């Protein structure tokens, strides 16, 4: 684990004292379009310093919440990244703490999910990520949902906000019973109704930042228009909060960002921590 000078704002606890542990995964080795997600953990941490410690809607001050930022894992290759994510998540879970992973590209999700038992996985993403392999790489960021489905069972995965499909991956997803609510259906239903059928008691939430419309989140690896709004993700975090056991946020690409994408990611992490703390203490 590399120690970095700048930690996520208000992450003032030691690992031992913390209930929630952040770590960064500065990796974009399988990125297929706008490279740069390896700079995202730093950029998101920087943006976190703009935000107030007090979240008035939850009456939670993050200065009172024991959470830790253990810095970035070393990940120069895909294999190294997957190993490091698995080990780090395993270590956090072993100590009965909650992992909050800052990508990096989306390929970090399967090695994280692998460390949990008895979970459902909710993925916010513009893309299905259901290709069996992409450019000969089965662990590509374009294959995340496929790998996660193999780990937890296709019936224990749901995607929200998808709007970009390869015909073959859609057909394969449909034939394997992959559940997803596409962008227009999600807008029609609203997040609350969409989550009514999510009945798992233990949920891992993964947010690919291209879930959002590029007008909100321009700095992503694979931008897709006609997307969702920040309120949708905030609502999702609030509804699922008490059942969450793990979280990641991926695909911010700082070289293409005006700061807003990293800022939104930082804000969502702060929302998550407040919601988790509230659900465990109030
Ligand atoms: Mn995506
Ligand atoms: Mn993705």
Image (cartoon, rainbow, N blue to C red):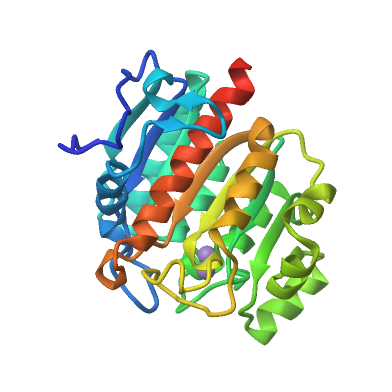
Camera sees residue 17: yes
Q: Quadrant of residue 40?
A: bottom left
* Quadrant where the N terminus is found in the figure: top left
| For residue 181, side relative to residue 101 (left or right) | right
| For residue 242, side relative to residue 247 (left or right) | right
| For residue 181, side relative to residue 65 (left or right) | right
Residue lying at the far left in this picture: please name it.
5
246 over 107 or under it: above or below: above
Residue under the image location 77 percent in, 39 percent down: 200
Camera sees residue 116: no
Camera-side residue of 235 and 94: 235
Where is residue 258 shown, x and y percent of the image? 29, 68
Residue lying at the far front in this picture: please name it.
56
* Quadrant where the C terminus is found in the figure: top right
Residue under the image location 67 percent in, 55 percent down: 150
Q: Quadrant of residue 259?
A: bottom left
135 over 96 or under it: above or below: below
Camera-side residue of 272 and 113: 272
| For residue 278, side relative to residue 189 (left or right) | left
Where is residue 34 shown, x and y percent of the image? 34, 76
Where is residue 179 shown, x and y percent of the image? 78, 62
Residue under the image location 26 percent in, 53 percent down: 43
Camera-side residue of 62 and 109: 62
């Amino acid at each position: 684990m590399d120690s970095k000078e700048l930690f996520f704002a208000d992450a003032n606890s030691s690992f031992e004292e913390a209930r929630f542990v952040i770590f960064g995964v500065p990796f974009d080795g399988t990125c297929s379009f706008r490279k740069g997600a390896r700079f995202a953990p730093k950029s998101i941490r920087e943006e976190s310093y703009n935000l107030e410690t007090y979240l008035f809607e939850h009456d939670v001050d993050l200065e009172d919440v024991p959470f830790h930022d253990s810095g970035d894992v070393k990940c120069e290759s895909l294999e190294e990244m997957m190993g490091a994510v698995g080990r780090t998540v395993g270590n956090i879970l072993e100590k009965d703490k909650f992992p909050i992973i800052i990508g990096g590209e989306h390929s970090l999700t399967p090695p994280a999910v692998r460390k949990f038992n008895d979970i459902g996985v909710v993925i916010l993403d513009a893309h299905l990520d259901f290709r069996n392999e992409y450019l000969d790489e089965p662990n590509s960021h374009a294959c995340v949902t496929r790998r996660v489905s193999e780990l937890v069972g296709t019936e224990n995965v749901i995607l929200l906000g998808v709007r970009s499909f390869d015909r073959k991956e859609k057909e394969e997803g449909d034939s394997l019973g992959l559940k997803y609510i596409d962008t227009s259906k999600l807008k029609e239903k609203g997040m609350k109704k969409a989550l009514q059928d999510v009945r798992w008691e233990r949920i891992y939430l993964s947010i690919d930042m291209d879930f959002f419309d590029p007008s909100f989140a321009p700095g992503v690896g694979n931008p897709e228009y006609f997307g969702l709004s920040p309120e949708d993700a905030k609502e999702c975090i609030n509804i699922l909060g008490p059942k969450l056991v793990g979280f990641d946020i991926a695909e911010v690409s700082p070289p293409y960002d005006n700061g807003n994408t990293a800022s939104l990611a930082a804000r969502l992490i702060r929302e998550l921590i407040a919601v988790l703390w509230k659900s465990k203490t109030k």
